[in-house]
Amino acid sequence: MAIAIMTSGGDCAGMNPAIKHFVDYCYTKEVQPYLIYDGLEGLIDGNIKAATYEDVAGIMHEGGTKIRSSRSKRFFEYEYRKQAFENLKKHKIDKILILGGDGSFRALNQFYKDFGVHFVGVPATIDNDIFGTSYCLGVDTALNIIRGATDAVRDTSSSFRRACVIETMGRDCGYLALVSAITCGAEVCIIPELEYDLESIGKRLKEEIKNGRKYVVCIVAEGCNKDKCTSTNQLVQWLENDIKIETRATILGHVQRGGNPTVFDRLMASKFVTYSIDKLLSDQEGGSVIVYNDSKFEFVTIDYVNSQKYEIREDLLELAKRLVN
Ligand SMILES: Nc1ncnc2c1ncn2[C@@H]1O[C@H](COP(=O)(O)OP(=O)(O)OP(=O)(O)O)[C@@H](O)[C@H]1O
Ligand SMILES: O=P(O)(O)OC[C@H]1O[C@](O)(CO)[C@@H](O)[C@@H]1O
């Protein structure tokens, strides 16, 4: 039997530890591990290699993904998926472990429907926005990077009595901004999921500044740039013009996607991969996603993961309510 691993969609810290655990654990189970390079694009082009210990030596502490990733237009077309299947057949690979987001799981679900290739999906995205799981691989490292950056920006903001607006990634989801605002002690948090009242935030900030506040930290989700929310630029203008505090913006960008994986992400990578390989070895067909909720792992269907939009838990939103008024 042969199992291949691939990474797809946005990369994240924790993918490399997962790849290393995959190779090590496959060998203990006497299963031949394969690496599919360049995500779905590599699967189409046959960029596939039998894995050796050397391929994954010394990668545990590295961010990104050694086997690289891609987003693929071609994979939407049957003829390219067929080509991908022929490539797997050449290596006698009958099962795939895929690390990515819900788009990647939909891709392999389609592949399963076409050719019956059995797979398990491991939720891996800094956005932490996959329905059915409270945790996605990589989010802990991303949060720690945001924490480090916010702590540093706060230092310089306080030296100048300035406000700072820090924009986090997350696509349409405000999870990264929300958790960062709570854990970094921000004064303001603007995310698509929480209603806010600029007028009352303004009153609060003015009062605090009058009483000696020397800096203001605002954390904004990138999803706010899109529609109904106040965008990063609008917030900067508002702070300068209405609150009368000099303000600088920091858009953290792709720095959040790299960096050494935290201990938590490394450990979770090991558990996700071990249980997923066990699942692939015990089931003979189908596709599923491993999820983590209330300290427990379980497997759910792709249809379940796709059935609803991810929503941030109410108790977490509650903790940030004082930052939106
Ligand atoms: N229905 C589908 N059929 C075939 N391929 C698909 C389908 N849906 C998605 N894909 C493939 O999956 C790839 C990855 O999906 P997507 O770009 O949405 O990223 P993701 O896995 O959700 O991760 P992230 O959102 O973190 O980047 C797409 O580029 C596309 O090639
Ligand atoms: O790397 P790209 O293609 O610029 O994508 C950026 C997007 O990917 C993510 O980093 C992960 O899905 C989002 O937070 C962000 O909006």
Image (spheres, helix red, strand yellow):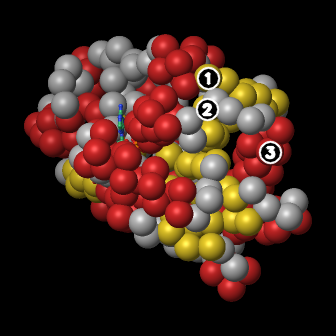
Query: Do callouts 2 and 1 mark residues in contact (Cβ within 8 Å)?
Result: yes
Is 11 left, or right, of 240 in this rendering? Answer: right
- Where is residue 115 drawn, in percent x and y? 49, 38
Q: Which residue is pictured at 64% across the width and 48% down the height? A: 95
Name the residue beneath numbered marker 3.
281
Q: Which residue is pictured at 26% across the width and 31% down the height? A: 224
Quarter residue 4 falls in: bottom right
- Where is residue 70 drawn, in percent x and y? 36, 57
Q: Which residue is pictured at 61% across the width and 32% down the height? A: 287
- Where is residue 67 drawn, in percent x and y? 50, 69
Q: Nearer the viewer, mark 2 or mark 1?
A: 2
Tell me the number on the disc at residue 301.
1
CA distance for labels 3 and 2: 13 Å
- Where is residue 10 drawn, in percent x and y? 41, 52
Work out whether residue 154 can be spotted. Answer: no
Q: Quadrant of the C terminus?
A: top left
Query: Do callouts 3 and 2 mark residues in contact (Cβ within 8 Å)?
Result: no
Of 213 and 32, the residue lying toward us: 32
